Image (cartoon, rainbow, N blue to C red):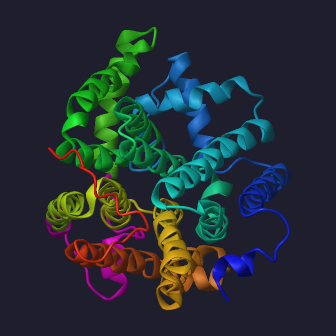
Amino acid sequence: MEPRALLSKLPGRPAQRGWGVWIAFTIVIAVILIAKVKPSHVTATYFPTAQTWWEAEHDIYTPGITGYLYLPQSLYLFTPFLLLPEGPVREIAWRIFGIALFAFGLRRLLRRTTPEGSDWHFEVATLLVLLATGSSARNGQTNLHLAGLMLHACSDLIDRRWWRATGLLWGGMLAKPIGAVMILLVGALLAPMRGRLALGLGVFLLLPFLHPDFAYASEQYRLALEKLSRSSQPGAKAYDDFVGLARSLGFTLPQAARTAVAVGMALVTLGLAWLGLRRGGRIQGLWILTALAAAYLMLFNPRTETNSYVILVPWLAMLATYAWFDRRSRAAAAAFLLGCLALGCDNYGRAVLAFSRGLTKPLTALVFFVFLAWTVRRLRDHALLPVRGDGPADPA
């Protein structure tokens, strides 16, 4: 049966069903938070650190590679939530903010990459992304916020809304320092964004000095750079990145090899994004650029955790809907569905998580990266998205 005919048997309209799922998901997260006695360890770091920043009585950075692992600028993202009562109200509001960014970002990008019927794509993609979203939403990590900002930025780049895209990209840096990856790709490859991103960099660098105590802000800035440098080399601790994958397969990579691989793959990512823009046109090229950034972050951020993969799952979910609705390829749709299921493995119980940690998610990311590379090579003859977007890609 044709996919739309199959789904049309369900009550309501597809967009309404999609939003209904997001609302139900948010309610479930809220109930879980109300039932919990204590906030998650990450929000128990975010908000007290923001409070400490404004009180300026203690350093916000601690020795070692744990604790607050963001730049001082990120505290401006957390600060508005200090106005809310401590406890479930604050925790729920923070989750709603992230879920809304993510859901609306997915909706916007699907509208720009499907010629018609994006409501159907949104309904199905919603179900698929939620497979890998639950743990990140429960914990309140900024991965969900960064994922949403990347989706929105991609849409605005497609629409040539350069200034808004600039704000969203630097907003991604507020969410997590690894947001720099997409900024660097966009700055290197899109000429209209270079000056805007440079101006945004100036504003971003000056943000901490809005603090009334200049000396305190300067000292925390210095400590932040030391902290990020230390935490970028987590040592023997296992993460769900390329190093964790190698370790799961029986290989141990020294630090020098890790750095060399990460730098080499950064150049490969840049080259693939450059080819994608020239061979695929504006819409396909920018979609591929952002998907490559997401895959690279999962594989080569030295502190990729299992919850981080909420950044990658939207791209697999969108491809599954393109394959099902537009290409009518059940095999391709099933392959991308399998990828979404793999990225949700931490939600299937402790036994599955113990088996899959360091293996299933980074392996899925690696296969997806290879798929993107293979796709870029064939873009002139085989479109990836339902909308080719053969207009100029505004290359550098």
Range of residues picked out in magenta: 232-260
Tell me what residue is drawn at x 30 percent, y 63 percent.
300
- The answer to whether 339 is drawn above or below residue 58 in the figure is below
The number of numbered badges drawn on the structure is 0
Quarter-wise, where is residue 213 in the image? Answer: top left
Q: Please give left or right for residue 165 compared with residue 83 in the image.
A: left
The reply to whether the magenta stretch includes residue 1 is no
Q: From the top left corner, tell me how far across and down residue 127 is, in percent.
A: 66, 69
Q: Quadrant of the N terminus?
A: bottom right
- The answer to whether 392 is drawn above or below residue 312 in the figure is above
Quarter-wise, where is residue 293 in the image? Answer: bottom left
Quarter-wise, where is residue 354 in the image? Answer: bottom right
Q: In this orientation, does residue 302 appear?
A: no
Q: Please give left or right for residue 27 compared with residue 211 in the image.
A: right
Q: From the top left corner, tell me how far across and down residue 43 is, in percent.
A: 62, 44
Q: From the top left corner, tell me how far across and down residue 162 is, in percent.
A: 34, 34
- Return the residue nearer the eye: 391 or 107: 391
Q: Please give left or right for residue 279 compared with residue 382 in the image.
A: left
- Return the residue nearer the eye: 24 or 344: 24
Q: From the top left corner, tell me how far across and down residue 247 is, in percent.
A: 33, 81
Q: In this orientation, does residue 148 appear?
A: yes
Tell me what residue is drawn at x 18 percent, y 38 percent.
191
